Amino acid sequence: MNFLPEVFSINSAMVAGELVIGGCKSTSLAKEFGTPLFVIDEGDFKSRINGWKSALTNNFGASAGQVYYASKSFISVEVAKWILEADIGIDVCTGGELAVALAAKFPADRIEVHGNNKSEAEISRAISVGVAKIVIDSMQEIERVDRLAKAAGKVVKVLLRITPGVEAHTHEAISTAHEDVKFGFSIASGAASKAIAAAEAASNISLEGLHCHIGSQIFENEGFILATTRLIEVAAKFRDEFNRELAELDLGGGYGIAYVAGDTTFDPDKVMAALAQLVKSECARHNLKVPKISIEPGRAIAGPTTTTLYEVGTTKDVELDGGKSRRYIAVDGGMSDNVRPALYGAEYCALLANRTSNSAPINSRIVGKHCESGDIVIREIALPSDIGPGDLLAIPATGAYGRSMASNYNHMLKPAVIAVANGSARVILRREVEADLLALDVVEAPRSIN
């Protein structure tokens, strides 16, 4: 495969036949930090934050709300500090993600709390630290937040997550706004209206607005347009019933990025310009003031900034029907550091990162080292026929849902994450060691539980 600038981070390039990221050679990074290795182009990450922030501000002006970085895509204390420096917010959906943000000294009043099944402990902590708002996802949660807020002597700002009944053009596993889904309050079923009434009646809840997220890795505008139109219709009905206008609409994220040749990463300015035109026209049609508009890019910021480096361990040729063959190239990672291909058939591309090859390309499959036939990183790709043990393969666009979904299957150690910039590299998440795996084992005598 040739180097494709559209799928690699901004500060990546091939130099003398070797992949260089942020001024650092792949071979030097692998030697210093080992493999598998997540390499974040720090400059690219920060520029993408600013790109989404500027796009929202430039297109919505006074109606621009907050850009919330969707931390589920990837978060660490250092990344949270980058978000803090950029003056945007963080969206968290578990107590663990909230803990990381707070460990980075991130201001609680710029944190939005998500999740379809928040525990009472998670809600209580969010209330106690003073998060900006909680996005409520169920009728039980309305009661739960109201009760816990009352116990804390506070009135908590909330958004209601609305399900607009949109079939997003993406994989079922990451489509989140159709009717048969675990998230939010359906408009069509009347659940949204019931939730709005209940939230308005709750004495320790301040309903600030509505939230919608239609899915992830979406390349077409139609879903965003339809969802936004329906959300504004709900806002207009709210105004008519309760004689006040909601202050905010959070339109979520899900903007697609390039993973393979032919993909195109959403341009923030184009997306926000189209969204602003729609929001303003729909609000005018319903005689509404344009509310604060917030968004939640995660993959669109983190995804393109990171490249995973693997070392090849073994190769073998497998004969197929019809006299064809396939080269299996096994690397030192796999589904424990990138489960997306196994989980929902996500596609990636790869590059020989440590040298130039003039060998003829061969039909290849990149696989991991796990005891699963489905441990496939890339199902089909043409790679040089002389790739062998010790070579480095680089897989770009792994910044979102790679390390964040990593597991210890087969007791694999989770890879390190390093940040590179201007020829320098530093660890921001260390590689796990065997002691980390063994630290959770407990030797305890049996005891009766009554």
Image: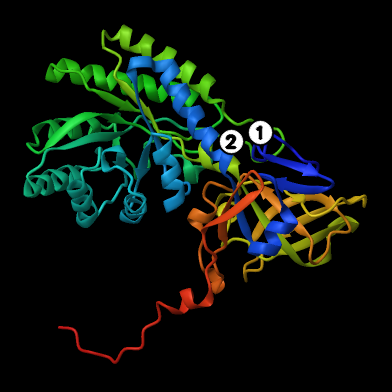
Checking the image for residue 257, the label placed there is 2
CB under 8 Å between callouts 1 and 2? Answer: yes
Residue 269 placed where, x, y %? 52, 21
Q: Quadrant of residue 42?
A: top right
Q: Earlier in the sequence, mark 1 or mark 2?
A: 2
Comparing 301 with 450, the one in front is 301
The quarter of the displayed image where residue 27 is located: bottom right
Residue drawn at 69 percent across, 45 percent down: 23
What's the amino acid at mark 1? Asp
Count how many numbered circles sit on residues in the image. Answer: 2
Image-based side of 356 in relation to 150, left or right: right
Query: 198 left or right of 366?
Result: left
Which x, y percent locates residue 168?
48, 33
Q: Gap in Å between the C-alphas at discs 1 and 2? A: 7 Å
Q: Is residue 177 left or right of residue 338?
A: left
- The residue nearer to you, when weighing 263 against 442, is 442
Q: Quadrant of the C terminus?
A: bottom left
The secondary element bearing badge 2 is classed as loop
Could you tell me which residue is drawn at 9 percent across and 39 percent down? 204
* Closer to us: 244 or 332: 332
Q: Please state which amino acid type lies under the numbered disc 2.
A: Ile
Q: Please tell me which residue is depicted at 19% across the width and 84% down the height of the picture.
A: 449
Quadrant of residue 448 in the image? bottom left
Q: Can you identify the residue that label 1 sits on?
A: 263
Q: Which is more toward the observer, 100 or 304?
A: 100
- Residue found at x 58% / y 39%: 43
Q: Secondary structure at mark 1?
A: loop
Q: Which mark is residue 371?
A: none
Residue 75 appearing in the image? no
